[in-house]
Amino acid sequence: MSIAPATERDVLVSEVGPRDGLQSISAIMPTEAKKAWISAAAAAGVAEIEVGSFVPARLLPQLADTAELVAHARGIPGLNVAVLVPNLKGAQAAIAAGAHKITIPLSVSETHSLRNVRRSHAQMLDEVRQIAALIHALPPGQRPHLEGGLSTAFGCTLEGVVPERRVLELAVALMEAGCDEVSLSDTTGYANPAQVRRLIKAVWSAVGRHQLTGIHLHNTRGQGLANVVAALDVGLTTLDSSLAGLGGCPFAPGASGNIVTEDLVFMLEAMGLRTGIDLDALFATRELLAAALPGEPLYGMTPLAGLPKGFAPATRKSDPA
Amino acid sequence: MSIAPATERDVLVSEVGPRDGLQSISAIMPTEAKKAWISAAAAAGVAEIEVGSFVPARLLPQLADTAELVAHARGIPGLNVAVLVPNLKGAQAAIAAGAHKITIPLSVSETHSLRNVRRSHAQMLDEVRQIAALIHALPPGQRPHLEGGLSTAFGCTLEGVVPERRVLELAVALMEAGCDEVSLSDTTGYANPAQVRRLIKAVWSAVGRHQLTGIHLHNTRGQGLANVVAALDVGLTTLDSSLAGLGGCPFAPGASGNIVTEDLVFMLEAMGLRTGIDLDALFATRELLAAALPGEPLYGMTPLAGLPKGFAPATRKSDPA
């Protein structure tokens, strides 16, 4: 199996484990194991992988090999290679490495932004403008897709409730600063399905429907897939998740951080939404992870419970089986 | 705090832990601990509790004290006292004990029915007819509510796919046999949100909207709350769940059987749906369970992660805060 064309998918599952999962654990996965993971995930049909983050290695030594992973991932036909960057310098490295998609997070909670990256909203938007200028100076065919990731969009552990008005203002500001798209991130696991529906619609009203297609949800309070149902209902089509929920939740044993790719793909396929991902191959990829990170807790229930007897994955809308 | 009147709730959370949770573990909880749990849950605002099952004690010694628990629970003002019964004999005991609600499960998969209770569909429906006759012979004010629980409604580990037509036929047959209501049960954790929506609507078309108000979902593959969102969307108002997801899932470590009351109530309240349940008091009830069942795995993420900073429970529709 390999990556299916976008026309054969209803939903894009964007695997963020190599970035968000690995940055959240103390173990450093060997580069060769990461490459094997990325290759196996792509072979299972995963069409987009966030392979790392261009942050200084002294801050996140777990992700120091991001450039090498981008190069590896670019060699996989059909794979969209995504990275996170915290600033202009990171974006320069991402462009040099050849990433297809660059996400720069902007925390809607300014307290969180100052605490996390020591930058105010104004400073972050300045950074985004410079990144956008850099990208637009490239020849059209070589420009990576620039996404502004609105983190803490559903609430902040420091500020508490985050006003929706603030999310909308920053969504507009990110688009004006030159992003191709914004995304919503439930960094803190605070989101609920009603809020997910409401906020997506509000952001669409503010920046346009095609300027928000994806959401990054956490499962800290067990609400991950419930929030996915809400996002799907409204019409989002890109969902971030992490194989085996890698990264976990430091303060809540048993609580995964990112939503679990295996449970997500099972849900989508069972609902009749095509992901292009083969579940058995995905479960096998999980074994790679277990072997490369001995002792690291892995989450997700479907691989353990097994697929339902008689389970059939989603089929083409034009060709119902 | 105590149980709020039904008019102050948007959703009825029906706690099934004392029955479905305790029947699934080998430890036998002392009767006094069960009473303390039931009292604490009711004090937290839980308005309906399935306190046990009238099955022979040699089959389920964990639930041998059900009659005593019904008597205890009936002493709690405002609490709806529910029990499960497998047959006429169980219903006689339930009526003698004074249960307010009696659920008799009927497995849509006849293979499962024969394996589980050694009875065919025809034999089970006969049993239901006799129970209904028994109830209708009582004075009007003393008649318990009779619910026919359609188990394996979303698929069966023995038969695999369960045809929706079969669910509808049996829903009609249960109503014709004298049930006041039917409910849907995802015994096997096979359900997905699209199927939940579809099946509820189909059952409504077959037996009427007021004849199906509740659903019993399992979290075996992590889909529990996602399926709740689907059920709420369509308009169901009664949701079964188990404190701390008690009962677990024997073959999938970390996979709870029943959906977790704590995570469910958090989701509902966060969505603005009033449950009448105080979350802090509910979390305290969990501690009772932990103390009474040492070593038994407990599930649920919200009690461990804590409520979001600035979290506000749902308020009255007529009085938005």
Image (spheres, coloured by chain):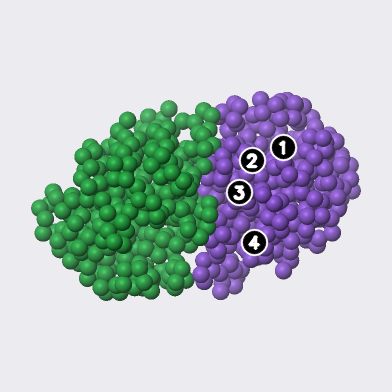
Chain colours: A purple, B green
Q: Secondary structure at mark 2?
A: strand
The quadrant of the picture occupied by the C terminus of chain A is bottom right
Amino acid type, label 3:
Ile
Q: Which residue is mark 2?
A: A185
Q: Residues within 10 Å of mark 3 (few under 14, many from 20)?
A: many
Q: Which residue is mark 1?
A: A105
**Mark 1 Cα within 10 Å, few/some/many (few <14, many 20+)?**
many
| Chain containing the residue with disc 1 | A
The answer for how far apart the CA atoms under marks 1 and 2 are is: 9 Å
Which residue shows up at 12% across the image and 52% down it? B140
Which comes before the other along the chain, label 4 or label 3? 3
Query: Which residue is tagged 3?
Result: A259
Please say if A169 is above or below A233.
above
Separation of disc 4 and disc 2 at Cα? 26 Å
Cα separation between marks 3 and 2: 12 Å
| In this view, A235 is above or below B165 | above
| Residue of label 4 | A283
Counting from the top left corner in percent of width and height, residue B26 is at 40, 55
| Residue contact between numbered discs 4 and 3, judged by CB atoms under 8 Å | no
In front of the other: label 1 or label 4?
4
